[in-house]
Image (cartoon, grey):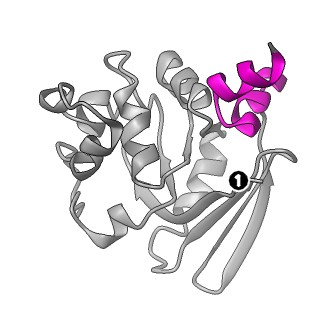
Amino acid sequence: MKKFGGPALFLDRSDINTDEIIPAKYLTEITKEDLKPYLLEDLKLPGFDPKSEKTYGAGAVVTRANFGCGSSREHAPWVFEVNGINVVIAQSFARIFRQNMFNCGMAAIELSPEKIDQLFTYAGAADAAIEVDVANTTLTIKGGGREESMQFEISPFDKALVLAGGWVDYADSKY
């Protein structure tokens, strides 16, 4: 079974849009792999370096509300996918971005503001990592000598998409 999560990248801002996730000037690239070096290139956050090892070594992103707003491009989830990030955890997502994540076999997990705040208490831990068990709808965060788990909700259909590896694999197994 596919593993979800890994080292955590914390992006402490709401309304991060698809142009900040992958700038529009790269949308003419031919393959998903061609998008890889441009992950979060235009995201401006204090102390954030889009070219850092922390960014390119991440397996999970924790952020605030309305993540993935802006255009409906699939390139935004793709750039995470080619960089090994298969989980984004936020208070809320733009509807199309969230569905594009599921369609690509990636987890878009919505949590309450209180739970997001709990996760952000790990942001200062250099070893912060998140493991997600999609089948059992639990996530575990570890770092700085601490560990805690929490439940999340996902619709049965979206869970099936993620567990199948995305829409194409799901359709191949059903039709």
Question: Looking at this rendering, what residue extends furthest in the bottom direction?
Answer: 145
At horizontal 21% and vertical 58% (from top left) the residue drawn is 46
**Is residue 166 within the magenta segment?**
yes
Q: Is residue 154 visible?
A: no
At horizontal 40% and vertical 53% (from top left) the residue drawn is 83
Q: Is residue 116 above or below residue 31?
A: below
- Considering the image in quadrants, where does the N terminus appear? bottom right
Residue 9, given in percent of the width and then of the height, sits at 43, 60
**Mark 1 burial class by Cα count in 10 Å: few <14, some 14-19, many 20+:** few
Q: At numbered mark 1, what does the secondary structure look like: helix, strand or loop?
A: loop
- Front residue of 3/118: it is 3
Q: Is residue 127 visible?
A: yes
Residue 129, given in percent of the width and then of the height, sits at 58, 69
- Front residue of 159/168: it is 168
Q: Which of the 4 image quadrants contains residue 164?
A: top right
Residue 44, given in percent of the width and then of the height, sits at 19, 47
Residue 145, given in percent of the width and then of the height, sits at 64, 87
Question: Looking at this rendering, what residue extends furthest in the left direction?
Answer: 25
**Is residue 78 within the magenta segment?**
no
The residue stretch that appears in magenta: 155-174
Q: Is residue 38 above or below residue 7?
A: above
Q: Is residue 87 above or below residue 78?
A: below
- Considering the image in quadrants, where does the C terminus appear? top right
Q: Is residue 169 left or right of residue 160?
A: left
Q: Amino acid at mark 1?
A: Lys
- Front residue of 89/99: it is 99
At horizontal 37% and vertical 32% (from top left) the residue drawn is 76
At horizontal 25% and vertical 68% (from top left) the residue drawn is 52
Instruction: Please give the residue where the numbered disc 1 appears in the rendered image.
Output: 2
**How many numbered marks does the figure carry?**
1
